[in-house]
Image: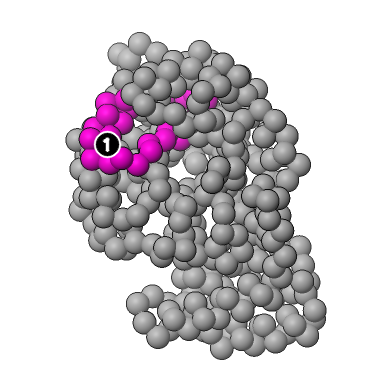
Amino acid sequence: MKHIISIAPMVDKTDRHFRNFVRMINKDVLLYTEMITAQAIINGDLEYLLGFEKEQNPIVLQIAATNKEEARKAIEIAERYNYDEINLNVGCPSDRVSGNAMGAYLMAYPEMVAEMVLEMKKVTKKPISIKHRIGIDGKNVLPEDYERVLLDKYEDMLKFVEINEKVGVNKFVVHARIAILAGLNPKENREIPPLRYEDVYRLKQEKPNLHIEINGGIKTIDQIDEHLKYVDSVMLGREIYDNPMILAEFGKYYGKDINITRAEIVEQIIPYVEKMEKERKVRPHLFLMHTQGLFHGERGSKYWKRAINDPRATSETVKELLKEIKAMEIK
């Protein structure tokens, strides 16, 4: 299946529970894990970090790494899990990530990224993709003796892509903004640098053999349709989290009509929460908090948010909410 729509990896959002929530609405969109560092995989609780239900496929594991050895070791460990694709994060602009020579910092070192890819290919046959920005401003972060700290031209991005294309990467997910590595937090880096969609379109035009996916500021079906005139696929982020019912509108991209109501989704939520209560591994709140956008723009939205954001919420809470939803005939 051609994956036309994907959901961006989002720290503290696209965890195992949120991905299961997405699958209650849409079975086809491509899911991503949160960004997981290679060191976390090497040293951490693997089931907590990497485990997922088979219903989540197709799903991509996104990692961040600082060198080829840890990248290879992390993917070798991750091979125990049935991910469909591995994605290397070369786009995260946070100080913490850049300070450890990961994420967008690595756009300054495309040859090092290519070495990571080659090492990962030694231990997996899964496709390896790269998520990156159109460029970076590395002032005050990159070493002072580095020859260039501002890599914000189209030609800089093209060089990065071409070097990694040579080692077998044929899918690039491009956030259409530069990353400013010092002075902006991640939220500001998603909003302040201007969007340059034309650079991503040009990349696809000049590299028609590559799969080019566009990301950044995309919120509506009309915007998706416009981007798909120029690129292969589209990645959405926070709009999905804030307004998850937009997932039901994506059926047209997969030749389907997703006629699911909010009440039907809540009916799926109840057994999921009951299972959490029975197993007693984690509190139901850790799932329910991801559903707060379910009634976005609808009557009762504030009431739903208030109820499910209560850490004491249970399956009985959801059952009572379902009765009220049906009484109000909310679709």
Q: Position of residue 264 (x, y in %)?
A: 66, 75
Q: Is residue 286 left or right of residue 141?
A: right
The answer to whether any part of residue 245 appears in the image is yes
Residue plotted at (64% across, 50% down)? 254
Looking at the image, can residue 304 be seen?
Answer: no
Relative height, residue 4 to residue 144 (above, below): below
Q: Position of residue 43 (x, y in %)?
A: 20, 53
Category of crowding for the residue at label 1, using alpha-carbon neighbours closer than 10 angstroms: few (below 14), some (14–19), many (at least 20)? many
- Drawn side of residue 299 relative to residue 183, left or right: right
Judge whether residue 58 is colored magenta.
no
Front residue of 153/86: it is 86
Residue at 27 percent across and 29 percent down: it is 118
Side of 289 where 35 appears, left or right: left
Pinpoint residue 305: horizontal percent, then vertical percent. 64, 71
Count of labels shown? Answer: 1
User: What amino acid is at disc 1?
Assistant: Met
Question: For the residue labelled by badge 1, is the local secondary structure a helix, a strand or a loop?
Answer: helix
How far across and down, in percent of the image, does residue 172 sit?
48, 31
- Residue 124 lies within the magenta run: yes
The C terminus, quarter of image: bottom right
Q: Which residues are magenta?
A: 113-139
Coloration mode: one colour
For residue 169, side relative to residue 195 (left or right): left
Residue at mark 1: 120
- Residue at x 72%, y 65% (from the top left corner): 259
Classify 315 as above or below 109: below
Say above or below: 29 vs 65: below
> Which residue occupies 20% across, 43% down?
73
